[in-house]
Image (cartoon, rainbow, N blue to C red):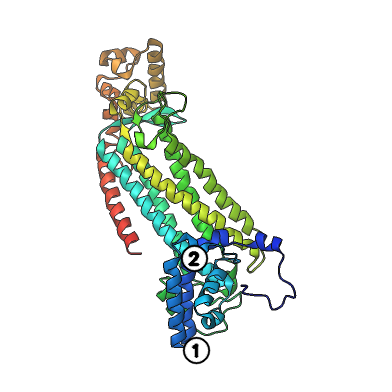
Amino acid sequence: MKLWGGRFESPPSEIFERFSGSLSFDRRLLEADIEGTRAWARVLERAGILTAAERQQADEALAALLAECADPAFFAGATDEDVHTLVIRKLGERAPAVAARIHTGRSRNEQVSLDTRLWLRAQIDLVRARILDLAAALLELAQAWPEAIIPGYTHLRRAQPVLWPHYLLAYFEMLARDWERLGEARARTNLLPLGAGALAGSGFAFDREALARELGFDGITRNSMDTAADRDFVLDFLYAAAVTMLHLSRLAEDWILYSSEEFGWLELGDEVTSGSSLMPQKKNPDALELIRGKCGRVFGCFCALFTTLKGLPLTYNRDMQEDKPPLFEAAEELAASLEMAAAVVRSARLKPERAEKAVEESWMIATDLAEGLARAGVPFHQAHQLVGRLVLESLKQGRRPADWKPEELAVVAREFTPELARLLDPREGMKNRNLPGGTAPDAVRRALGDAASRLEAMRAATGRR
């Protein structure tokens, strides 16, 4: 069955049929297409195209299709051009007179846009819920070791000590932005395109705003030509998905390193790791490596569609059919990666003694000491030089900060007064970083409480959708 053909003298070739068909991937839109077609039947009833009995017949037939579509046999032997043709064909098997008129006043262009928006809206809700689940897991892990100190790094070199919860809150902030970014993508997705027609608007009068409310949309699209050409909302989602995957990839990279023997202060659960077929001792961070690897696939999905759309003239072009494979792939990989990341986080165990030892055996308190000198009146450039000289002397002697006695510091430089020796303890210097966003214990406690409140607010906002 074709939704077109009267203008043609001969059918399309078998090669073209195979090349242009999209049922193999747009079948995911089946439920959305049925929902949209049921709504369109109501529009046609109000327009006098269908009788009340015909509309009811269409509704019952489409409801039956919806109930049957979970069975894989539903698609058995289907050779339809796309999911939209499939639905109308199967509707025609139950209600042929209705099926012949169901497409009145509706273009496949706007139908595709509607289906994609309905499907994507649900996917965004799923992904946002999984982001919040991962964020909750991070807060739980932070509360498990609220006072633990770990090394903070720049250039992958030990830099300054931070509290374990402070480190995890960094990823909480990334996820909060991801949640917001996806919400913005949802808002641009959640507009009703029906009424745009093929590109010039529908020739049948109906209340677009009322239909938008009926289908749960926030509003309607504003220009029929833009509606036919628009895939910005898909790009918005793909960009948000790519940034979220980037954040997951950075977390994965961190934890692959921190759980390795060279770092050794994080342990991943057996349930999210694997062994080697040859080396009995191995415990490999495969879950995290796969998240890191899938990041590239989602980046590719965004780049693929971005490139596809870049040179298209207004309005609809068949190129736009190629929006769905990258959209479906990115949505699937993002949802799976978020679920996997939450499982990894809930399996992880900090080794606080090893983390603190890594802090204590290095000179990560050097900045605290330099700032202590500056607060005592020493120009910071001079303080920086003095502490650098102390670090160099310590490295030559193989001494850690804790190995220095107050009176010995004064021998290195008279500016090192006895009261500055307390800053050799990383926990002391950390107390000075009490500004909002800092790693001082009080600041981190406040930040954890704020994060918990924001998480509940985000959950409530998501639940209202």
Q: Quadrant of residue 156?
A: top left
- According to the picture, the residue beneath numbered tag 2 turns out to be 30
Q: Are marks 1 and 2 in contact (CB under 8 Å)?
A: no
Task: Judge from the rendering whether residue 394 lies leftward or rightward of residue 440; answer left or right.
Answer: right
Which quadrant, please, contains the C terminus?
bottom left
Q: Quadrant of residue 61?
A: bottom left
Q: Residues within 10 Å of mark 2 (few under 14, many from 20)?
A: many
In this view of the protein, can residue 227 be seen by the observer? no
Residue 350 percent coordinates (x, y): 31, 32
Give, as a three-letter code, the residue at label 1: Gly
Mark linked to residue 48: 1
Q: Earlier in the sequence, mark 1 or mark 2?
A: 2
Element type at mark 1: loop
**Residue nearest the observer in this picture, 361 or 416:** 361
Kindly identify the residue that appears in the image at 36 percent across and 44 percent down: 342
Q: Nearer the viewer, mark 1 or mark 2?
A: 2
Residue 109 percent coordinates (x, y): 58, 71
Give, as a three-letter code, the residue at label 2: Leu
**Residue nearest the observer in this picture, 297 or 254:** 297
Residue 241 percent coordinates (x, y): 48, 51
Up/down of 250 relative to 365, above or below: below
Q: Residues within 10 Å of mark 1 (few under 14, many from 20)?
A: few
Mark linked to residue 88: none
Which residue of the protein is positioned furthest toward the right in this rendering? 9
Residue 39 percent coordinates (x, y): 45, 76
**Residue nearest the observer in this picture, 207 or 415:** 207
Which quadrant, please, contains the N terminus?
bottom right
Element type at mark 2: helix
